[in-house]
Image (cartoon, rainbow, N blue to C red):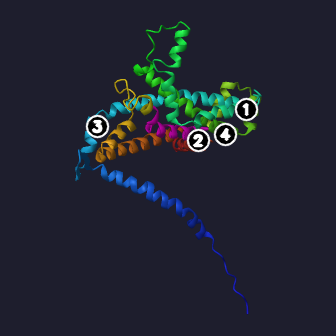
Amino acid sequence: MKQKNKKVNYSKWGYIFILPFFLTFFIFSFIPLVDTIRYSFFQYFRSGLKWIGPNFVGLENYKSLLQSDMLRYAGNTFILWIIGFVPQIVISLLLASWFVDARLKIKGQQFFKVVIYMPNLIMASAFAMLFFALFSLKGPINSILISWGVITETTPIDFMGTALGTRSLVGVMNFLMWFGNTTIMLMAAIMGISPDIFEASEIDGCNSFQRFFRITLPLIRPILAYTLITSIIGGLQMFDVPQILTNGAGSPNRTSYTLIMFLNDHLKSKNYGMAGALSVYLFVVSGILCYITYKITNDDDPDGSKAAARKRKKMERRMK
């Protein structure tokens, strides 16, 4: 009797292994997302001890948000993000280029990498409390300036009493917390470039600026796109630093009040309809911004073959 060869099918085990992820995503992410969108079309809030709704109101929640200070808070969020992100990406690119440049022969790279990354391990709430203590009216910064004779005891600098001061502190904190992580990612991206390319450019007479802008930046474009997209999402979700630094008030005059702080107020007041509508706005805006960023930073013709083919077709049409 000939025994039949039994084939063992292992493909099902792949689906079994990824099943926990999809179950977790469906229960804790997909269902709440759908429920949030559903609530955005309903009037659903608590007035005292009485619940109002849920009553279907269509797009009224979205219209009410546009008539509120939402756009002003969106502007605040954008300004706070710009203040923190621009120095973050510039300094991260410079540090990453220096650390991976073999010609500079920087000693103690591992030590510097650890020091740069350490602020990323500190909780944002701890950072905010630290800066609140440092830059308060009777804090160490004012005490140092008084001892140096820069200011007098009767006229301490109120760093958090002006829009520029508060926004600058929030931007500095966001920069310190995230530039280390960005530097490490950009270093990994640059190290992935073949050294032969840099050697060839050096033989051809390229200087440091040409090498950086013509070789390094184009070749690390995917990581730059990822960094920018994650930074945009993080900027739209900015909450903990301004919340703790200003005690939830967004002072002065709500100039550091962000969209998530606005959303948090709706959640605390149990106004789930308005909170759902604002969440949908944030979801749509972040999706649009990420798509635009991806299209700008993504090069779908890295070797120029598509452009050459288009030119060839134009030439053929002219010849006809």
**Secondary element at image label 1:** helix
**In front: mark 1 or mark 3?**
1
Residue at image mark 1: 109
Residue at image mark 4: 188
User: Which callout, 4 or 3, points at the residue further toward the start of the chain?
Assistant: 3
Real-space CA distance between mark 4 and mark 3, rounded to the nearest whole angstrom: 43 Å
Residue 247: image quadrant is top left
**In front: mark 1 or mark 2?**
1
Residue at image mark 3: 66
* Percent of width and height locating residue 106: 75, 28
Q: Chief secondary structure of the magenta span?
A: helix
Q: Amino acid at mark 2?
A: Pro
Report if the CB atoms under discs 1 and 3 are less than 8 Å apart: no
User: Which callout, 1 or 4, points at the residue further toward the start of the chain?
Assistant: 1
* Percent of width and height locating residue 183: 62, 34
Report the residue at 51% width, 41% height from top.
Answer: 294
Q: Amino acid at mark 1?
A: Gln
* Percent of width and height locating residue 71: 33, 33
Residues shaded magenta: 219-241
**Secondary element at image label 3:** helix
Depicted 16 relative to depicted 31: above or below: below
Crowd band around label 2 with a 10 angstrom C-alpha radius: few (<14), some (14–19), many (20+): some
